[in-house]
Amino acid sequence: MTLTFQDLNLNAPLYNAIEDLGFTTPTPIQAEAFNVVSSGRDMVGIAQTGTGKTFAYMLPVLKNLKYSTQDNPRVLILVPTRELVVQVVEEIEKLSKYINNRVLGVYGGTNINTQKQAIAEGVDILVATPGRLYDLALSRVLQLKSIQKLIIDEVDVMLDLGFRHQLINIFDILPERRQNIMFSATMTQDVDVLIGDFFKSPQQVSIAVSGTPLDNISQKRYNVPNFYTKVNLLSHLLRDTGRFNKVLIFVAYKRMADRLFDTLDEAFHDELCVIHSNKTQNYRLRSIEQFRHGENRILIATDVMARGLDIDNVSQVINFDTPDYPENYMHRIGRTGRAERKGESFIFSTEKEQESITKIEALMQMQIPLIDIPENVEISTELIEEERPQIKERNNPLKRRDEDAPGPAFHEKSAKNSKENLGGSYKFKIAAKYKKPKSRGDKNYNKRNKRK
């Protein structure tokens, strides 16, 4: 039996907002989490990125959030990146269209005094990154004594980014009597420890195993020898603008993102944008909005930046680099094929990346179909710095032959420098050598004088 939003027993303002958004059926995580969150129990939700987690916790929270004139926030939502703060605030505002509440997002990289002023004006729901929240709490402008519900979204990413100590510090300054709600795409050991330390008998709601491939995503892979051949193959695919109309390209790290952007810029200048953590906040938000609204059809991103972002109608996800962790592959391809639409994913793998492919296929318990590189794609022999073999220095080889092995660390000393253990007679030899004068305290001196 398929649940509808009518079965969730929401109130009229929420029904009106959902109707305006055109939604009729809740996603599995929304249906499963609603009663648990409504009950006030601690909850841990395990669901893949793109399954509607924001609405899963906000629908029951907004239903039970009474109107209040108090200034201090009652609901705190922690997310790992600035982009997610902006996105979650937008989602809450959509659901709150007919509800009188105050929502505020705060994050680093912007003027903290402006945020202090906004907090002082009063807020009901606060969405924040851990670092900026802790800074605001220490400044005494933000009072957390009224927090009734703590929601941590994408907690596995938060721990990967090194926010563990900040999270623990935040737990310490929150009221003990509160409801804890946590959402994660994967259940790692770090997440498990955090739950054990701070949650009280949480109920777990798990939707689909982390490695379950989405049925509506067609997956393909190419074995590609090097970076420039990957670029040639990627350019070949991107020229089909009808099929590849909204493409998200994942790379391993920031330097690779910039390198790929620079390489593709000449051919796809006006269609291309890039996001990673070294870009300014305004640049990142502008790139995401331009991609979301179709002004740019190609977005190059690193894993951390694109995690959790809700971008509709992504036609293809292209894994330019094969991720080291198979779970990251699942998060990447989950960017396409959303809301029951069909999607495509491609993965480019060099010889060194084959081990990672094996791990991905083991996690999914299926093989990704291997496709031959099209004949008109040039196979490049040019290598980037990371791909070139390490050149051994002529006079400093990594492996030495036996005859080249270094000798002893020290040589035999000359006779005059050699030392001999003389035992107790040593001091007498030294005295004789340097003809040390006898003192009046010397017993032999006194004996000689008595004889005289």
Image (cartoon, rainbow, N blue to C red):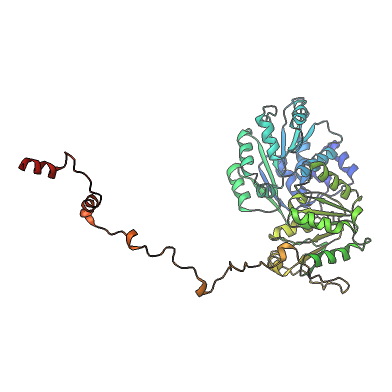
| Residue 336 visible in image | no
Point out residue 262 in the picture as x, y percentages from the top left corner.
83, 56
Point out the image quarter for the C terminus.
top left
Above or below: residue 379 compared with residue 100: below
Q: Position of residue 153 (x, y in %)?
A: 72, 45
In this image, 103 relative to 429: left or right? right
Residue 174: image location, x then y, percent: 64, 34
Q: Nearer the viewer, residue 7 or 350?
A: 350
Relative to 276, 198 lies left or right: left
Residue 174 vs 367, above or below: the answer is above
Q: Is residue 278 visible?
A: yes
Residue 190 placement (x, y as % from top left): 61, 50
Q: Residue furthest left?
A: 451
What residue is rendered at 25% in x and 49% in y?
434
The residue sitting at 81% across, 70% down in the picture is: 380
Q: Nearer the viewer, residue 121 or 373?
A: 373
- Is 109 drawn above or below residue 398 in the view shown? above
Q: Quadrant of the N terminus?
A: bottom right
- Label count reads 0
Residue occupying image coordinates x 78% and y 69% = 224
Taking the image as shown, residue 319 lies to the left or right of residue 237, namely left
Q: Quadrant of residue 148?
A: top right
Q: Name the residue nearer the viewer: 154 or 46.
A: 154
Front-lying residue, 92 or 429: 429
In the image, farthest residue toward the right: 242
